[in-house]
Image: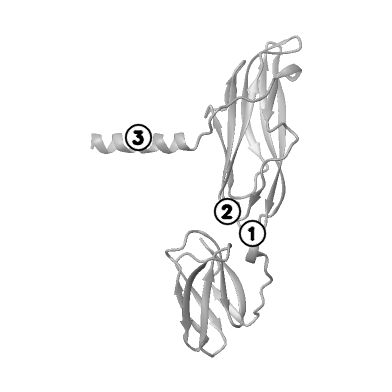
Amino acid sequence: MKKSLLLLVFLSASYFLQAQCTITPGCSTTSTGYCSTPASGSSLPAATEQVAYNTTIQLSLGTAIGPATINNATITSVTGLPTGLTAAYNPSNGIVTAGTSACILVSGTPAAATAGNYTMTANISVSTNFGASPQTLTWTLVVNAVTGIASFTASSSTMTIMPNPASSSITVLSGTENIIVHITDILGKDLLQTTLQQGKGNIDISSFAPGVYFLRTNRGAQRFIKQ
């Protein structure tokens, strides 16, 4: 039992460490008392729907803002991220001591239908000898729609895929004739080919990784999502 508990603690700690960013200060705090890389008001690397994403924001905290002495700063929250992305801090409690640095790891996989422009906001409370001072840092994040063949317009109103999204298998209905079906990923790589008798059948997708896929036949193409 003790060995099992120790193993669980070790695995949990390993996961936690992997979820943290590495602090590498890269800016000068100057007169504002703090700074970030990328700078507040700039853009983060673009993300894409259904594609794994991660980027790190570096934060540095000075020791003074004008006549005020900085004690520390606390990252109280990060808002404005699309569904599927989360933010994690290092230090994990979000507390940055004066004269040191921190980082924010933005990671995850943007959900389907999240394409658009987002404003990520880090809300920070700076503690000084005159009291607390709330501050905000913002960055623009663009989430692109899936590219390549994913930008197609469904060309077959007579073909049905259900359920969609699906987790283990899909049912395809497309007329009454035998049809050859190809399933590809968003880059166009052919993953599966099969023949559906009388235009209908079930296809096992349990081995597919979660993401967006395309089912093509001589009747057209449809997009579906594997959960």
Provide residue 78's location: percent of width, then percent of height: 64, 36
Query: Would you say 21 lies left or right of 68 here?
Result: left
- The residue identified by callout 1 is 146
Sooner in the amino-acid sequence: mark 2 or mark 3: 3
Is residue 68 depicted above or below 161 in this figure? Answer: above
Query: Which residue is nearer to you in this view: 191 or 214?
Result: 191
- The residue identified by callout 3 is 10
Query: Which residue is nearer to you in this view: 165 or 49?
Result: 49
Amino acid of disc 2: Val
Q: Nearer the viewer, mark 2 or mark 3?
A: 2
Is residue 37 depicted above or below 15 in this figure? Answer: above
Quadrant in the rendering for residue 121: top right
Q: CA distance from mark 2 to mark 3?
A: 29 Å
Amino acid of disc 1: Val
Provide residue 68's location: percent of width, then percent of height: 72, 11
Q: CA distance from mark 3 to mark 1?
A: 37 Å
Verify CB contact (< 8 Å) between mark 1 and mark 2. Answer: yes
Q: Secondary structure at mark 1?
A: loop
Q: Secondary structure at mark 3?
A: helix
Quadrant in the rendering for residue 9: top left
Is residue 187 depicted above or below 142 in this figure? Answer: below
Characterize the local packing of mark 3: few (<14), some (14-19) or many (20 or more) Cα atoms within 10 angstroms.
few
**Quadrant occupied by the N terminus:** top left
Residue found 58% across the figure and 78% down from its top:
160
Residue found 74% across the figure and 37% down from its top:
42
- The residue identified by callout 2 is 51
Q: CA distance from mark 1 to mark 2?
A: 8 Å
Characterize the local packing of mark 2: few (<14), some (14-19) or many (20 or more) Cα atoms within 10 angstroms.
some
